[in-house]
Amino acid sequence: MKILAITSCPNGIAHTYMAAENLEKAAEEMGTNIKVETQGSIGAENELTSAEIKEAEAIIIAADKAVEKDRFIGKKLIVVGVQEGIRNPKRLIEKALNDDIPVYQGGDSSNRDKMPTSSEATKQNPIYRHLMNGVSFMVPFIVVGGLLIAIALTLGGQAGEGGIAIPEDSFWKVIEQIGAAAFSFMVPILAGYIAYSIADRPGLAPGMIGGYIAANGSFYGSEASAGFLGGIIAGFLAGYIALWIKKVQVPKMMQPIMPIIIIPVLSSIIVGLLFVLLIGAPVAQVFESLTGWLAGMQGTSSILLALILGAMISFDMGGPVNKVAFLFGAAMIGEGNYEIMGPIAVAIAVPPIGLGLATLLFKNKFEKAQQETGKASITMGFFGITEGAIPFAAQDPFRVIPSIMVGSMAGSVVAMLSGVGDRVAHGGPIVGILGAVDNVVMFFVAIIIGAIVTAFMIKFLKRDITTTPIKDTTTQESPNASDQKVENITKLTDITNVNLIDTNLNATSRDAVIEELIAKLDSENVLTSTDDFKQAILDREEESSTGIGMNVAIPHGKSVAVKAPRVVFGLIKDGVDWHSADQSLAKLIFLIAVPKHAEGDAHLKILQMLSRKLMDDDYRDKLLHVQSDQEAYELLEEIQ
């Protein structure tokens, strides 16, 4: 009998591979054939093929985040948390071999919404998650539509008494019409994918139909439409109505047609009638009033709006607050008001460009690695990627975030007062170059002013760095330790040596252990700042404990203070409390240090190597009983 499994945890690191390793070990002991797909932070590995799924008798999903299940329709399916895969792999396999487990029929969004752990649920409100799902699918339509219209006006427009217009018989008129068609999908797509996020596929059609009705006032006798506000309302209505109908118990013979006929039809009728008879006209009136109020903003009121939008965009650099302001600007584009998105487009670019400029002008404020990051930050800002500022904010949030907020606010105000408009839901100089911006000269002026303000705020707020000469460590390190390129890390001893091992740690608390291990790194000249790296380690511990259980803890930190990937191993005979999931005291401590630039690959590869090997009970027992640092090093050579 063949069993397939998928393991995944929210961070996609240790627990993902621990669960996979335990399932594979348990299956081998039980004489059962199993293949495990891991969905970690570096993507899906050991992927299940359609042929394997067809031949499989049962599927086990041990995951604490959403896993796509549609490929398993018609198969016996068990869905549990990742901890169950770690602690009770044999029981899961025994259950999978039992004929009593249910066959997955598909169309079950309730499981999908229940997948995230409670810790995740506290971080992200489901209403916000559903809304952002709709926005993510809507934005490409606005970008395509806006760019096509902007290009058509730039290349084919002719000046006249009423402004720039495109001749009716022109090729560019066709391009403009294609852009307008893309815009017309905006509200239906927004509503449809909000509903899809709530109720899965049965919610998609009623959501889009409700969105279409919201965008066309003729359905409810209004000259104005309900716009994006109506689309949001339609999406949530359709999603929750479809979800409610799904929960209704129906005869078995009706179950196959519920998701494709009954639910979409009933939901569409209910949402459509609610909009036509009750909701449409009042929402249209509210939206029309809002649009008129924004269009009439002048003087101090427009400055206040620009200040608010600039602050929101830069505050969390692509996070929830940023997305709310962005959605507002994108919605106004759909209503023909481009002067809201203009200041937003400036604010999007200011943080990464301003910080990049600061690294060029005020080198004494930044480490060498940060100066290199500044070059990439400017490039990201050029293409409207605010997240380019995140590495700087993560290192020094109390000085960097106020600096970029002030800069973005300054740039937004200049853009608002200059009448800068943006026809595309995007920002950065790229949209100006592509012709999507009205008053493009002042658009660039606003970005430059915002970036300069940001740079000088950094100069006044940020402290000068204390430079420490970097010594050549090649003679100090083991021949095995070394190159920071992740492709050269084939085993653990490539990035550790006997000097980075301590089998007699004296600390009696988690933080004291971390300090002892960091001191080992510092003695090998691996760090430019022990304080910065310690803070990176503690920040990671705040997210969730790195005590993975079974007397093991794997604290890890990513920081510009780290010169090259290294691992320090420490042994505490009596153990310390690391808030491990199984309540065991941590005795085997592996501290991982990686440079900030390697965060996407190095630490994940190291964690994967460690997690798999440390599932071996005999291996852990050997490590617990080593008598010297050299003996421990020889055992660590087995980790690859």
Image (spheres, grey):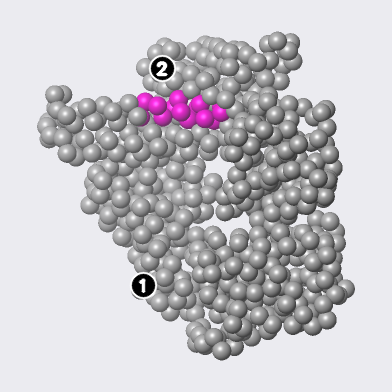
Image: 608 above or below 310: below
- The image shows residue 334 at horizontal and vertical percentages of 37, 31
Q: Specify the quadrant that holds the C terminus.
A: bottom right
- The image shows residue 344 at horizontal and vertical percentages of 39, 47
Magenta part mainly helix, strand or loop? helix
Please tell me which residue is depicted at 82% across the width and 77% down the height of the picture: 626
Between circles 1 and 2, the one closer to the viewer is 1
Q: CA distance from mark 1 to mark 2?
A: 53 Å
Q: Which residues make up the magenta segment?
A: 183-196
In the rendered image, is residue 620 in sight? Answer: yes
Q: Is residue 427 magenta?
A: no
The residue indicated by pointer 2 is: 217
Q: Nearer the viewer, residue 131 or 133?
A: 133
* Image quadrant where residue 360 sits: bottom left
Mark 1 or mark 2, earlier in chain: 2
In the rendered image, is residue 123 in sight? Answer: no
Give the secondary structure at mark 1: helix
The residue indicated by pointer 1 is: 360
Image: 188 above or below 349: above
Image: 601 above or below 504: above
Please tell me which residue is depicted at 52% across the width and 53% down the height of the picture: 316
The amino acid type found where label 2 is placed reads: Gly
Q: Specify the quadrant that holds the N terminus.
A: top right
The amino acid type found where label 1 is placed reads: Leu
Please tell me which residue is depicted at 84% across the width and 68% down the height of the picture: 621
Q: Residues within 10 Å of mark 1 (few under 14, many from 20)?
A: some
Give the secondary structure at mark 2: helix
The answer to whether residue 420 is left or right of residue 349 is left
Q: Is residue 190 magenta?
A: yes
- The image shows residue 409 at horizontal and vertical percentages of 41, 54
